[in-house]
Image (tube, rainbow, N blue to C red):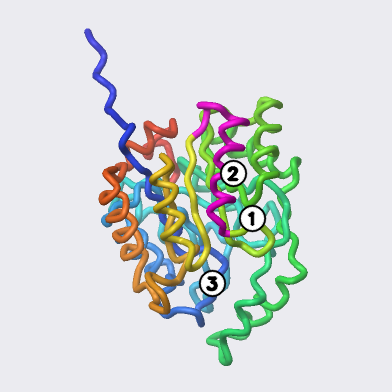
Amino acid sequence: MTEPAKRNLSNKVIISCAVTGSIHTPTMSDYLPVTPDQIATSAIGAAEAGAAILHLHARDPQNGRPSADPKVFMQFLPRIKAATNAVVNITTGGSVNMTIEERLAAPLVASPEMCSLNMGSMNFALYPMAARYKTWKHDWEEPYLLNSDANIFRNTFRDIEHIYRQLGEGHGVKFEHECYDVGHLYNLAHCLDRGLFKPPVFLQIIFGILGGIGADIDNLMFMKKTADKLFGNQYRWSVLAAGRSQMPFCAHAAMMGGNVRVGLEDSLFIGRGKLSISNAEQVSKVRSIIEELGYEAASPDDAREMLGLKGYKNVKF
């Protein structure tokens, strides 16, 4: 009996969509998904628009504050799975104010196909955004932003190994390795040398967060060159850029053979001064860019094959 022929995936670009995150606050956009219903609806819309991977955080449905509560996650995860076969990628970053135990609570319950994993400790500053707003929907928002000048986003080597042991070995989870600077690539290479993680690895190279590498195309070229040197052909990569750099960086990444991430976690806008009305709107725009460049949006099953995922039947939601 002959084996089925493998699909040609060389022309496929994986679109990830980060649906809500923990950076932006409800005052910044009425379109930011907050409640489980809003998160589910927005995620499903993004998948229908062409997102193969849905990167998910949770928020307190009463005030929109970032939440690590597995009970909140479980109000939207089953609904997303029932409506789409998109790959669910649950954060292990949570927010910079959460402990490692809090950040792992939901993925340990849900056992998703993928989780994000931040590859180094860093300053993670949001406070300049506070100056743009005079009034706030909720009391927590302004101090949350202003106090971020004291934030250290903790991701030590011990933390990284702990997350790998718990989720990688314990649940067969593959990781979106979030690399905010060149040193994070070297951190991942060190972990691979120690036998942590199984190649090919999936890099998410991040630009424009205050505390990480800047949103400069020269930096994109250097990060890609460094990844080539460290990982050879044993990796796939994607790019996200914060704010107004989102779409230009995605276009450059696609032209360089990379994958892309969009979503309201990374930018609230669809164009200069124009708020995006949904995650689906951003996915549709980046999909058009990809297709104009001669590529195709990868399906969820394409992404599973490209990244070596365990499959949606093996999750616990």
- Does 124 lie within the magenta span? no
Instruction: Estimate the x, y position of residue 304 in percent, counting from the top left.
Output: 38, 36
Residue tagged 2? 223
Q: Amino acid at mark 3?
A: His
Residue at 61% from the left image edge and 37% from the top image edge = 226
Name the quadrant of the N terminus: top left
Q: Specify the segment rendered in magenta.
A: 215-235
Q: Which residue is mark 1?
A: 213
Tell me whether the residue at label 1 lies in contact with that at label 2, contact meaning CB atoms closer than 8 angstroms.
Answer: yes
- Say which amino acid is labelled 1: Ile
Residue at image point 67% right, 75% down: 127
x%, y% of residue 46? Answer: 33, 58
Q: Does dot 1 land on a helix, a strand or a loop?
A: loop
Instruction: Establish if 75 lies above or below 28.
Output: above
Q: Which mark is residue 24?
A: 3
| Front-most of residues 46 and 108 | 46
Residue 186 seen by the camera: yes
At mark 2, the secondary structure is: helix
Between disc 3 and disc 2, the foreground one is: 2
> Disc 3 on helix, strand or loop?
loop
Name the residue at 64% across, 55% down. Answer: 213
Residue 222 painted magenta: yes
Question: Would residue 195 be found to the left or right of residue 250 on screen?
Answer: right
> Which residue occupies the extreme front position in the image?
218
Q: Quadrant of residue 13?
A: top left
Q: Nearer the viewer, mark 1 or mark 3?
A: 1
